[in-house]
Each structure stands twice: as C-alpha cells, then as structure tokens.
C-alpha cells in the first residue's frame, strides 16, 4: 500500500530530521509513499477563523482522496487538526456542502473516504510490533526512554483514535519492539507548553521547564518526543538553561530515529546529530554549546521559570 506523508509546516523548516528519519524507516519497512503537495493542516486558524481551518484541512483530505491514498502524519497537532475536521464534516451536512462547493472551484471533492493516522499508529497497527522486533539488527537494550505522548494525539481520543487518553500503551509497545526500556514518569501525558508560546512565552517556557524537571527525576537516559512543537520546546528550554550555565537533559530523540538505529541505519541517515540536545546515550557526544534562539529569549526568563 502507498501512503501520503503529511509533513505540516513546522517539520520542513524546524525539524527536517523528523522527515529524514521517517522516510528512511518507511523505506526500510517497504512502505511506499505517494507524492501529494499538501497545504497547512489548518490548526493555527481553528480558534481564529473556523471556516478557514476546516477548508484548509478538507483540501488536504481531498488531495489524498484524489490520489486514492491514506494519510500518514508526523506532527501530532496535524493529526488532531485533520481528524477534527473529518469529525466536523461528518456531523454537519451544511458545513460539508459549503466545503465541497469551495473545493469544486479547483476540481477537488471531499467524500470522507481518506483515513488519517499518525506514523506511530501505522507502525503499531500496519507493520506490527512483532515484525519490527524481528527486523531489529541492533537492539537498543539498556537504553531507558521517557516518552511524551503529545496532547493532540490523545485528546479527544474518540476523534483521534490514537490511543486511550488516560492509559495509553502504544508508544511503550514500539519502544519495547526495538529493545529500549520505557520509563514511567510524571510528564508522560502532560502538555509541553507549545500552544502558549506566542501568547504567553513566560508560561510556555515554565511549562516545558517543569517537564524537564520531571524528566530529570525519571532516571531515563533519553527523552522521546514525536511532535515538532514539543521538539522545539525542548530545544528552547535546553538552550535557555545552557546560556544560564545549567544542564537540561541528556538528549531528545524521535521514535523513527530510534527505529532507524535498531534497523541498522547509520546515525547520520536518521539525522540524530540535528537534535538539540543530541541523545548522548545513543551518540556518546558531549552536550553542545548554547546558541541561537535562547539568547534572544532571555528577556522572558525569570528565576521562577527555571526549575532545574
């Protein structure tokens, strides 16, 4: 089966290693990708102009329908956005009529026939943890991993269909499949603060700092995130702490990077060196020096924000 890979807006600009590692592991697993030129998922517009949000999301779904392929998302915000749009369109006939009329202007149509799943859901359900385990050539045994599920994948679970909002286990299953040890911790199902960043940077930074504090108490050697918003939040917090002369965490990693390593791929092929901070448990590197965005953001950092 072929899939359409939905990258969203953040990944190409801020987290290209997510795309690199995802494409690499999908190729290794024999999953083929169709070329579809998507637009924004509509998420930034949802609470500003609902019709713009729904039309943006529906256009993506219509593009996939035209190709006859299901959609794989990498960003969990994009997953939530597209799944919510499907739900709204299924429940509101007048909204569906308006959207179909707009799409018809460029020769597109939306019938609700396209499925949308996150990469991890496809790996879990379509590939399967047993097959992944069988394909592992470089077990990650001994690597303790704390994972953040991502708010928009879990809630509302009846719409996203990712996993239980209160007792998810999908990511832990995938971590065990590559030999890693999932570590329970307080921040596992909590928000990274990403949605607050443009409106309230102080609170946004304080939120991700609290997640890092909880991670530090977990005993894990690496933090696994699979949402580009969370990846950027971790980078921001890490660089802010480094400017202050404090250490943040041993490293952050995306699941397709872990899977790629377990399948025998070179760390460079999955973009492991692009993470900030790189996972030292996997690379053995020293923590990188602080630079960039953190210096510009120091004006929003107060003593009460920095919990580590």
Image (cartoon, grey):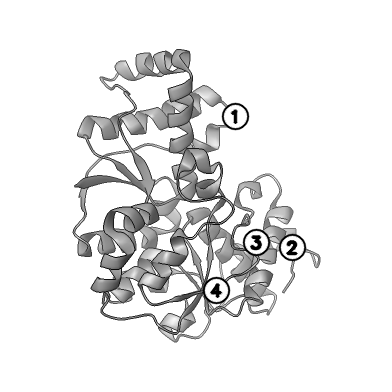
Identify the residue under disc 2.
301
Task: Judge from the rendering whether residue 10 lies leftward or rightward of residue 69; answer left or right.
Answer: right
Q: Position of residue 241 (x, y in %)?
A: 66, 72
Viewer-proximal residue among 69 and 166 = 166
Marks 1/2 in contact by CB < 8 Å: the verdict is: no
> Which residue is labeled 3 in the image?
208
**Is the residue 203 above or below the residue 184 in the image?**
above
Give yes or no for contact between labels 1 and 3 (Cβ–Cβ under 8 Å). no
Disc 1 on helix, strand or loop? loop
Q: Residues within 10 Å of mark 4 (few under 14, many from 20)?
A: some
Which residue is labeled 4 in the image?
Answer: 183
Looking at the image, is mark 2 or mark 4 earlier in the sequence? 4
Residue 279 location, x and y as percent? Answer: 47, 77
- Residue 262, compared with residue 4, is above or below; it is below
Q: Looking at the image, is mark 4 or mark 3 nearer the viewer?
A: 4
Name the residue beneath numbered marker 1: 48
Per the model, the C-alpha gap separating discs 4 and 3 is 19 Å
- Residue at image point 37% right, 17% down: 102
Q: Residues within 10 Å of mark 1 (few under 14, many from 20)?
A: few
Q: Secondary structure at mark 2?
A: loop
Residue 19, image x, y percentages: 34, 57
Mark 4–mark 1 CB contact (< 8 Å) = no
């Amino acid at each position: 089966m072929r899939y359409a890979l939905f990258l969203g807006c953040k990944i190409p600009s801020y987290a290209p290693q997510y795309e690199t590692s995802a494409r690499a592991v999908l190729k290794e697993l024999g999953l083929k990708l169709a070329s579809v030129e998507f637009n924004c998922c509509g998420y930034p517009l949802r609470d500003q102009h609902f019709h713009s949000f729904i039309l943006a999301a529906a256009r993506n779904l219509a593009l996939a329908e035209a190709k006859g392929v299901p959609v794989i998302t990498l960003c969990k915000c994009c997953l939530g956005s597209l799944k919510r749009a499907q739900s709204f369109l299924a429940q509101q006939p007048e909204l569906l009529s308006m959207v179909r009329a707009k799409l018809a202007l460029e020769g597109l149509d939306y019938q609700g026939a396209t499925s949308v799943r996150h990469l991890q859901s496809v790996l879990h359900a379509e590939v399967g943890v047993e097959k992944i385990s069988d394909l592992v050539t470089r077990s990650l045994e001994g690597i303790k991993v704390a994972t953040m599920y991502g708010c928009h994948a879990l809630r509302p679970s009846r719409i996203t269909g990712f996993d239980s909002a209160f007792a998810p286990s999908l990511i832990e299953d995938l971590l065990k499949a590559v030999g890693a040890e999932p570590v329970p911790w307080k921040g596992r199902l909590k928000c990274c603060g990403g949605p607050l960043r443009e409106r309230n940077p102080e609170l946004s930074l304080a939120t991700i700092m609290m997640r890092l504090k909880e991670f530090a108490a977990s005993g894990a050697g690496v933090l696994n995130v699979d949402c580009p918003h969370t990846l950027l939040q971790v980078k921001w917090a890490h660089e802010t702490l480094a400017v202050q002369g404090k250490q943040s965490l041993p490293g952050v990693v995306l699941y397709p990077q872990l899977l790629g390593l377990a399948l025998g791929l070179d760390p460079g092929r999955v973009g492991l060196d692009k993470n900030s901070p790189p996972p030292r448990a996997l690379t053995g590197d020293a923590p990188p020096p602080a630079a960039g965005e953190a210096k510009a953001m120091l004006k929003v950092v107060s003593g009460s924000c920095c919990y580590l």
